[in-house]
Image (spheres, helix red, strand yellow):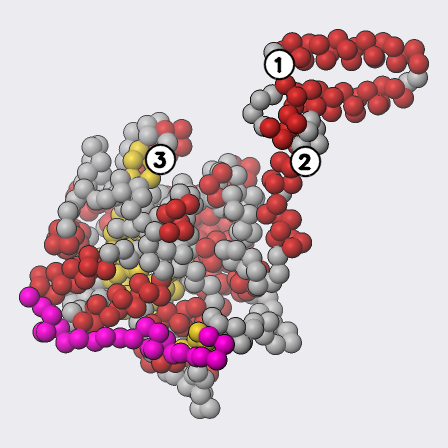
Amino acid sequence: MRTVFILGGIVIIAGFATLGYFVHQSFWWALGILSPLLFMGFYDIIQNKHTIRKNYPLVGRLRYLLESIRPEISQYFIESDLSGRPFNRRDRSIVYQRAKAVRQTVPFGTQLDTTEPGYEWVTHSLFTTHIEGDLRVKVGSSQCKQPYDCSIMNISAMSYGSLSKNAVLALNGGAKLGNFAHNTGEGGISQYHKELGGDLIWQIGTGYFGCRNNDGTFSRELFQKNASIPNVKMIELKLSQGAKPGHGGILPGKKNTPEIAAIRNVTPGTDVLSPPRHSAFNDSKGLLEFIQDLRELCGGKPTGFKLCMGKKSEFEDICKQIKNTGVYPDFIVIDGTEGGTGAAPLEFSDRIGMPLYDALAFAYECMVKYDIKKEIKLIASGRVMTGFDVVKLLAMGADGVNSARAMMFALGCIQALACDSGKCPTGIATQQKPLMNGLDVDDKKVRVGNYHTNTIKAVKEILEACGLHNTDELDRSMIFRRVEENKVMTFDEIYPLKNVSADSVLN
Ligand SMILES: Cc1cc2nc3c(=O)[nH]c(=O)nc-3n(C[C@H](O)[C@H](O)[C@H](O)COP(=O)(O)O)c2cc1C
Ligand code: SF4
């Protein structure tokens, strides 16, 4: 049908053209412009997929055009400084400014409505302090042989594959420049994670990429080999992530290139599954035995796990088992449901998993209750952008934070929201060479380093303004939130710590 239409169109236009040749030469110009439109209009009439185009030929196409540029129109012309999603313009701008190390002040006073419910602030002191040096935390329980002196802010897990080679290089180069750590994500350790020498946290997901047997099960030998790389400072077992907890993933055969296959220890060209759960253990006790095994195999490097909080009873059971078995993971990462991802089903992104503040409050409470917090560092991730975000999470009980999307903004992400299309315009979340070549590693690694340095500086300045000497002095009573127009609560009222003696609950 389509061929008949096209041939018919050619015959008609050729007829008109012959006629027009004898009339006037400008007719050719009109013909050149009109005939493609004519074709498109006819095609709209005969196609059956799009009702709007069929009913309103040619004009109906405008709708699709406008839809396709809606994010850009909204971002550049409609969105206010505080209304953009997931991150507003002001948050994005502060990351860009800190990454470029340009002016980081705001003029004329706050744009926030301080009378609105949700407005938050931290109490300052009349007697400010001065803090020297970096803000770092030692990760490593009494069972760890190689504790890691970790920055309080590090790059959250994002794999090579979901990110481009240049993005991974720039993140790792930034980590090296700023003396902080770069999490590999569950896709294994690529050469781009190693080339520039930044510290690594090697993440092991359910696919055991980089440490798997042919049947997809965990390989102790391969794990031991890769974990011994000197740049690998810590091992993170991923149980789940905030944006899609309980959802596995698939690496389609066409994306499984020989390079990716070699990194992940899989067969090139085949579909590779990341199942929703681990095959190496089935319960809390098994999880701890596995953590113990990993820590021994890697020569005693800090080994911990990451999860998005689901059933509270399951997390409580892990804490109980930690106390009962005496096996201490060195750290636990709590990822809020508001966390980012390259791609996730809508329901999982929006409706599954606990938001970060509720989850962190519960995790901290549980760890104190079972008297295990002193051995285990608690790391939080989910929408960390500014110094105030970091301070709030530390006040809630975290020892450090991880950030993924703020680091992407530092790389130049413009929130085009096309990460799952493979066509990221900034060369970050793509494998297309022409796009990724636009991301200059030497320039962007400096930006990543700058963003980290300037954010840590902002945290320090807040601590100093609060009259504190280190991050341990922060607590929930220092953070206030307006919950109603005439009602303000502190974080220790909103998230009360029900600290029960460990002896009374152990069985
Ligand atoms: C592009 C992208 C890829 C990610 N890949 C992983 C991953 O491999 N493993 C993981 O545990 N989390 C992954 N995450 C989640 C982040 O590590 C982090 O938990 C989450 O984004 C919360 O941080 P944010 O709000 O700072 O982005 C990814 C996030 C993004 C944006
Ligand atoms: S610029 Fe790239 S990384 Fe950023 S949101 Fe868009 S597609 Fe994703």
- The residue that appears at 60% across and 28% down in the rendered structure is 51
Q: Which residues are magenta?
A: 484-507
Give the residue number, with chain letter if any, for mark 1: 2
Q: Where in the figure is residue 206, as x and y percent of width and height?
A: 25, 43
First of labels 3, 2 by sequence position = 2
Give the residue number, with chain letter if any, for mark 3: 251
Vertical placement of 19 versus 293: above or below?
A: above
- The residue that appears at 39% across and 59% down in the rendered structure is 382
**Is mark 3 in CB contact (under 8 Å) with mark 2?**
no
Q: Where in the figure is residue 391, as x and y percent of width and height?
A: 40, 73
Nearer to us of marks 3 and 2 is 2
For label 3, the SS is strand
Which image quadrant is residue 392 in? bottom left
* Cα distance in 3D space between marks 1 and 2: 22 Å
Q: Where in the figure is residue 267, as x and y percent of width and height?
A: 29, 29
Determine whether, in the image, residue 441 is placed left or right of residue 247. Answer: right
First of labels 1, 2 by sequence position = 1
**Of the residues shown, which amino acid type is indicated by label 2?**
Leu
Give the residue number, with chain letter if any, for mark 2: 62
- Residue 505 is a magenta residue: yes
**Of the residues shown, which amino acid type is indicated by label 1?**
Arg
